[in-house]
Every structure is written in structure tokens, then in C-alpha cells.
Image (cartoon, rainbow, N blue to C red):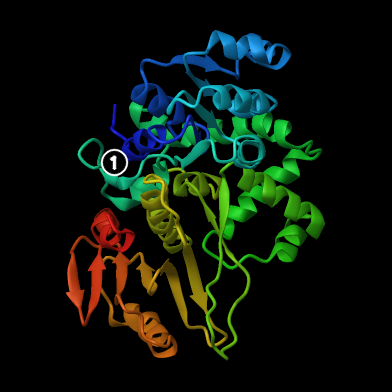
Amino acid sequence: MIRRTAEVALHALAGQYPVVTVTGPRQSGKTTLARACFPGLRYANLELPDVRRFAVEDPRGFLRQHAGGAVLDEFQRAPELASYLQAEVDADATPGRFILTGSEQLEVLNRVSQSLAGRTGLLKLLPFSIEEMAGHFPVRPLEQLMYAGFYPRIYDQGLDPAQALSDYFATYVQRDLRSLMNVGDLIAFERFARLCAGRCGQVLNLSALGADTGVSHTTAAKWLSLLEASYIVFRLPPYFWSTNKRLVKSPKLFFFDAGLAGHLLGIQSESHVLAHPLRGALFENLVVVETLKYFWHRARRAALHFYRDSDGNEIDLLIELANGVFPIEIKAGETVNPDFFRGLRAFARRYDPPPPNGGALVYGGTDYQERNGTLVLPPERLPDLLAPLAGA
């Protein structure tokens, strides 16, 4: 089993709180992580109808059966249990008694914030990172990662990525989607998801997205919220500061897994990625999510943004720090081109005072170097860049 970087944060939170809540996409490894970190705790899977029925119909009896603590898997299936769990941990606040996992972030976090505020630590677990895969599975060529994605089952079980991602999305539509909201036209919803993949790394225009799908702006907004709630997509907000420049105010759209985005685009092989017109967008998606994983898997706040002004100057990724921001430009090319630095130079001229920590270029090559004060690095060296920024 690949050791997850989130293990350290999970143990730390369990040493401080009686409950730890682990959320993340389906098949991101939440259950494996929780059971590996706490082998002495009992395990209850609330996906199983009989277990769920027991928890819903007799919550006090269910918790009495697990008085010594337990890993409660897919907690969103019995959300009413949170109120009874509150009373349980108020009576015995021993740290690390209960580990909750859930794959529907809004439902789980809403219940947790209402009933377990101050009693639970929160950890978000995404699929494998390049950092975790290195030394276990190949991380080059990068096109293979953009095709296969990072869901652990694909690697642990040697699955065909195209089939596994197809099954993943079909299962999501058939099961999770119905539990979140009654979507009448599943064909239109699948078309909507594929159109979202086509806008990966682009500024979001919900009206245009809805029109291309053939649904209203309101429906498009609801469907996007569904994709966000189940950890399929997320919005990267723009960055603002005191300036009289006109800035883009809409977020960018990204997928939590570049492989799933590629699947929805119809990509069926590594070679298909190489020739695909959205290869650059998928690479940007990969780098943004790898950055997100670094922070989330260490239970740290990820203050990530992008920047774009009305003149077309853009920075793909900005990390907000206590003393300013750190700009990162992302380019899929394997050969460093002087034009790659144009956005960083333009941003440095407009940002007052200039970014105190310099900036970086993440590109498709393999060298790690510095050019005129800018670090140039491949995605697999991101931890080296992020560790000092995160204060690790």
C-alpha cells in the first residue's frame, strides 16, 4: 500500500479532537487511510443497508455498540447520526474516538458544522499525488498521468484507465447524483459534464455553458453545484488587490482529477493526449490540483487564485501568503521559451509592491533551475517549491 502524505495530518488531528472528518472524492482512498491509521478502531460501512438502517433507526444503540470508537464510513448516508454523536463525544471527549469519512462534501460538512462544531478536525483527501506515486508507479511521461488520472484503484488493481474512468463516472451518475438531487434528464447532465471538461482551465461562463447544454442558467448553476458537491469539479477564484486595472471577476473551472476530465473529453490513450488541443489545459489542471493536494493533505488552508486583467495578462496560479502572493506560471511545453515568463514579468510590474518571494514556472520538462530570479521546475518537484511557502 502506498503511504499517503495525509497520514501525518490525520494522526495529528486525531490527537486533538474526539472526531476527525475525512472528506474527498469516491475512491480517493479515505477508507484505506482511516483503517490503516487506526487499526484498533471498529469499522462500520454506512453504505450497507442493514448497517445504515441500524444507525438511522436506533442511533443510540448503534453508538453504544461502538462506544470504544469507530471508523464510520460514508457518514453522509446517515446524517442524523451527527446530533447523537455530539452528545456521545460531549460525554467522553477522548481524542481520536471517531473517524468519519464522506464523499459528498456539502452534506457532510453542513452536518458536521451544525452538530460537531469545535469537536471535529477536518481533512480533505484527494486521489494520489505525484509525490506519493513517485517510486511506486511511473510519473513520466506526463501524458500517461493526464490520461490515467490518479484514482488509487486504477494503480492498485492494474485497471484499464479508460474503462475504470468510464465506470467511475457511470456509477457517479447512477448512484451519487440521484442521492444528491433528482436530475430528470441524465443525458443532458452527462452532456453538461462533458462540456465542463471542454472548459477545463477556462474562465467560467455559466450562461454560455447552459446554452450549449440546452438548459437554463439556473439549471446549469444547480448542476455545477452537484459536480462540486461530489468532488468532480471546483472553481478557482480570481485574485484582487487595490488596483485601478480592470480584472476578470469570474472563476476558472477545474476538475479534481485530470484523468476524469480527459475521459469526458473522449481521450482514450496516452498518444491521444499528446495530439489533443486541450493538452495544455489538462496540464494546467494537473499542476493546480497537485498544488491543492499538497496543502489539503497536510490539513492546511489552500488560498489559491488566478490573475487575469483586461489586457490579457495572466498568471495561472497565485498562492496567497501572509506577506503577499507567490505567482506560478504553468506551461505544458518541455522546452523553456522566453515567452513563458511574459505573464510573470507583467504581473511583477502591476503588483505593488512586487511579490516578495519571487515566482515560479512549472513546465513539462524535467530540469530544475533558476532563471533571472524565477524557479523553473517540473510538476514532480512541486513539493520542493511549496514546502517553504507552506512553512513546512
Residue lying farthest to the front in this orientation: 91
Q: Which residue is mark 1?
A: 132
Quick check: can you spot residue 335?
no
Task: Give 107 or 272, whichever is nearer the viewer.
Answer: 107
- From the top left corner, tell me how far across and down residue 144 is, in percent: 34, 46
In the rendered view, tell whether residue 223 sits above or below residue 375: above
Task: Give 208 or 64, whichever is nearer the viewer.
Answer: 64
Q: Quadrant of the N terminus?
A: top left
Judge from the rendering whether residue 295 lies leftward or rightward of residue 178; answer left or right: left
In the rendered view, tell whether residue 93 sits above or below residue 360: above
Helix, strand or loop at mark 1: helix
Judge from the rendering whether residue 381 lies leftward or rightward of residue 311; answer left or right: left
Amino acid residing under circle 1: Glu
- From the top left corner, tell me how far across and down residue 366 is, in percent: 21, 60
- From the top left corner, tell me how far across and down residue 172 is, in percent: 61, 33
Q: Residue at x 28, y 46 (%)?
A: 131
Q: Residue at x 31, y 52 (%)?
A: 142
Q: Quadrant of the C terminus?
A: bottom left
Task: Give 209 or 95, whichever is nearer the viewer.
Answer: 95
- From the top left corner, tell me how far across and down residue 173 is, in percent: 66, 34
